[in-house]
Image (cartoon, rainbow, N blue to C red):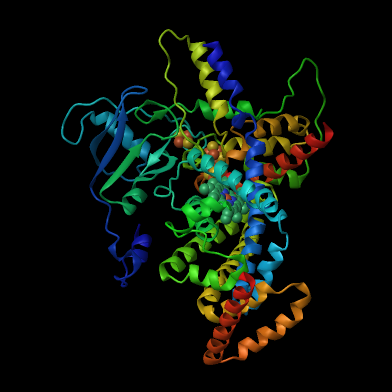
């Protein structure tokens, strides 16, 4: 009996460090996960600026080269996994009671949990859909790529592959719901964070903060959905043509690429087709001479 | 009465109050009963004749006097707790029409205006039921013990008068001091979940209590205790023990379990600014944690 009481007093690792873990959970929601999400949505919105702009932004990220996976894991995946795992524990520790107490704060509390589940589902699908989860050649080719429709995004063909991946209206709808849920979760989370850490304490201060977090949420929703408009309006052929040139050039040729982009933009579809044909022939010839 | 009538039942029949009928002569009361701790609960219906100025306590008194259910079966009186009968002791807290509140200040005519058919009474759902509408709220008081919600000034000699308390400080403290430990804030809190242990075969009362308190200490302390920490930490004498109270708030089941649903502040019958206390306690524990880290 004494032992049972003693064991209850001792608790588990989670219970002994509950305060620290909960504060870390709160922090990781904003930094780095929330901050990353803002950058990510802003980058995606640049699809609106055409394939040149989006490709430039994607290249900038990929200029990290071999350091990219390390950066991704330390600043995105590990904090996100930590936040999600602890988040699930937190959700299970509570007991939603919206039907008895239908108050604004309680609706928001419940939505924070509902959007958490949607975010979990959406992010898991999204990372699979675009990247196939693991950058392992065998996995990508045999599992992710073919049968399940994953790994659709190619950073060298950013605009065109993104547009093709999201061509289906159903996928766009799912992405729209996912993005709005994540944004709500972040904006409302920002507000609750302010109470958790003691930034806004009085009712009046919390109301003021609510306006700011609300405005932030609306702005980020617009940015997030802008990316969906961006991929919808992307002309895949033009984007592919541009991306091809862009991919083959090196940094010294940057300026020439800019000019080429302008030129391609001004081409009519017929001219473009002719050019693509000539290009293909040229390539075939080059391959032939190489083979000899 | 005449004045009220001239307001409600005047020419505008289609007004909001158009469907506001005279209170019924009789009404039904549905009570969720339970004969013993851990026993299954069951519903029992009663029919009560309406009288002027009834509250839920007087309804329960009528039920005891009638000792008969709506179907005419003999029954025992429904057990409930009450004391002050003026909403200052918190003892009579129960779920009236699904909402946590004090039975003594729940007026029958108002309840019938919301639902003329029936009044539903249930015991609080977050505390172990002793019998019928009586619950054991010892966890609520254990939480106050855990966070040391008092100022230790007892001693063998006169310590003289304490420091002066500024009017601004008094103004902040007074609302927090109104807490009557009713438990409404805990009942409505989605993060506060029921802890009910069963006494084991051959377990002494002391052993059971120790086991129960250990379990309570691991559960969420609740908004009332967080608010009391702010009350005593902001008092110039109480501030001497502020770090110990903050430590208690940062232990398992502490302030970190709050999910900011803000139901507590919405249901508190004393309108205590609980979420302000939670924000202030959040700030105090943040500062305390940083201090502790660098002062170690
Ligand atoms: C897009 C990714 C996500 C972002 C940007 C994000 C951000 C945040 C932020 C800023 C908070 C506020 C923390 C606080 O109130 O102190 C929060 C809270 C929360 N998050 Fe996330 N989160 C994300 C994904 C997830 C996922 C996948 C889950 C779990 C399935 C989750 C579960 C939770 C829970 C349960 C809370 C409430 C914590 C509490 O009330 O103490 N989140 N999140
Ligand atoms: S604000 Fe915290 S203490 Fe109050 S009801 Fe919500 S979770 Fe419970
Ligand atoms: S804070 Fe309010 S609701 Fe909670 S116990 Fe005190 S008086 Fe009751
Ligand atoms: S009897 Fe004291 S509050 Fe109802």
Q: Nearer the viewer, residue A168 or B22?
A: A168
Q: In which quarter of the image is the C terminus of chain B?
A: top right
Q: Residue at x 60, y 32 (%)?
A: A14
Q: Residue at x 60, y 30 (%)?
A: A15
Would you say residue B1 is visible in this rendering?
Answer: yes
Would you say residue A200 is visible in this rendering?
Answer: no
Q: Is residue B216 above or below residue B28?
A: above
Ligand 3, by image quadrant, is top right
In the picture, measured across the screen, residue B137 lies left or right of residue B246, that is left
Q: Which residue is drawn at 44% across and 67% down?
A: A173
Residue A177 in the image: x percent, y percent?
47, 63
Q: Nearer the viewer, residue B71 or B279?
A: B279
Residue B46 in the image: x percent, y percent?
23, 37
Asked where in the image residue A52 lies, by quadrant, the reply is bottom right
Q: Which of A28 and B292 is in front in this view?
A: A28
Q: Is residue A155 above or below residue B167?
A: below
Asked where in the image residue B151 lies, by quadrant, the reply is top right
Residue B27 in the image: x percent, y percent?
25, 45
Residue A18 in the image: x percent, y percent?
62, 34
Q: Quadrant of the N terminus of chain B?
A: bottom left
In the picture, measured across the screen, residue B12 lies left or right of residue B142, that is left
Q: Which of A183 and B121 is in front in this view?
A: A183
Residue farthest toward the front in the current orientation of the protein: A292
């Amino acid at each position: 009996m004494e032992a049972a009481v003693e064991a209850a007093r001792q608790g588990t690792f989670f219970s002994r460090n509950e305060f620290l873990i909960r504060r870390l959970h709160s922090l990781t929601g904003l930094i780095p996960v929330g901050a990353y999400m803002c950058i990510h949505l802003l980058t995606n919105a640049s699809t609106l600026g055409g394939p040149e702009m989006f490709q430039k932004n994607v290249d900038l990220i990929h200029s990290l080269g071999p350091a990219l996976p390390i950066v991704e894991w330390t600043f995105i995946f590990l904090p996100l996994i930590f936040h999600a795992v602890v988040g699930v524990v937190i959700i299970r520790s509570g007991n939603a009671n919206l039907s008895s107490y239908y108050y604004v704060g309680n609706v928001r509390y419940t939505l924070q949990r509902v959007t958490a589940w949607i975010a979990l589902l959406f992010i898991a699908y999204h990372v699979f859909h675009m990247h196939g989860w693991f950058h392992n050649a065998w996995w990508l080719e045999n599992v992710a790529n073919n049968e399940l429709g994953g790994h659709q995004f190619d950073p060298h063909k950013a605009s065109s592959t993104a547009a093709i991946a999201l061509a289906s209206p159903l996928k766009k709808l799912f992405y729209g719901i996912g993005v709005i849920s994540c944004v709500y979760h972040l904006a409302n989370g920002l507000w609750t964070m302010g109470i958790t850490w003691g930034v806004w304490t009085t009712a009046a201060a919390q109301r003021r903060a609510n306006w700011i977090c609300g405005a932030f949420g609306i702005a980020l929703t617009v940015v997030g959905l802008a990316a969906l408009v961006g991929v919808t309006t992307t002309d895949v052929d033009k984007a592919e043509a541009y991306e091809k040139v862009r991919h083959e050039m090196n940094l010294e040729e940057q300026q020439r690429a800019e000019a080429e982009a302008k030129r391609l933009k001004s081409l009519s579809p017929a001219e473009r087709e002719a050019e693509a044909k000539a290009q293909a022939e040229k390539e075939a010839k080059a391959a032939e001479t190489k083979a000899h | 009465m005449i004045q009220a009538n001239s307001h409600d039942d005047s020419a505008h029949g289609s007004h909001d109050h158009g469907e506001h009928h005279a209170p019924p002569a009789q009404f039904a009361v549905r009570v969720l009963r339970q004969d013993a701790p851990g026993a299954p609960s069951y519903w029992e219906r009663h029919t009560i004749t309406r009288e002027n100025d009834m509250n839920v306590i007087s309804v329960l008194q009528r039920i005891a006097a009638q000792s008969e259910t709506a179907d005419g079966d003999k029954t025992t009186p429904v057990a409930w707790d009450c004391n002050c009968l003026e909403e200052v002791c918190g003892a009579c807290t129960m779920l009236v029409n699904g909402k946590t509140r004090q039975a003594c200040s729940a007026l029958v005519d108002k309840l019938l205006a919301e639902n003329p058919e029936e009044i539903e009474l249930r015991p609080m759902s977050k505390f172990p039921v002793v019998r019928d509408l009586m619950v054991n709220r010892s966890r609520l008081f254990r939480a106050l013990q855990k966070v040391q919600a008092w100022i230790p000034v007892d001693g063998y000699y006169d310590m003289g008068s304490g420091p002066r308390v500024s009017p601004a400080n008094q103004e902040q403290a007074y609302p927090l001091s109104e807490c009557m430990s009713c438990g409404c804030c805990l009942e409505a809190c989605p993060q506060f979940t029921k802890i009910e242990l069963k006494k084991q075969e051959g377990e002494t009362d002391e052993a059971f209590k120790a086991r129960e308190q250990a379990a309570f200490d691991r559960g969420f302390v609740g908004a009332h205790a967080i608010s009391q920490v702010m009350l005593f930490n902001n008092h110039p004498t109480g501030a001497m023990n502020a770090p110990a109270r903050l430590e208690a708030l940062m232990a398992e089941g502490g302030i970190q379990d709050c999910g900011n649903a803000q139901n507590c502040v919405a249901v508190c019958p004393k309108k205590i600014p609980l979420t302000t206390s939670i924000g202030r306690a959040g700030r105090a524990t943040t500062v305390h944690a940083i201090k502790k880290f660098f002062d170690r």
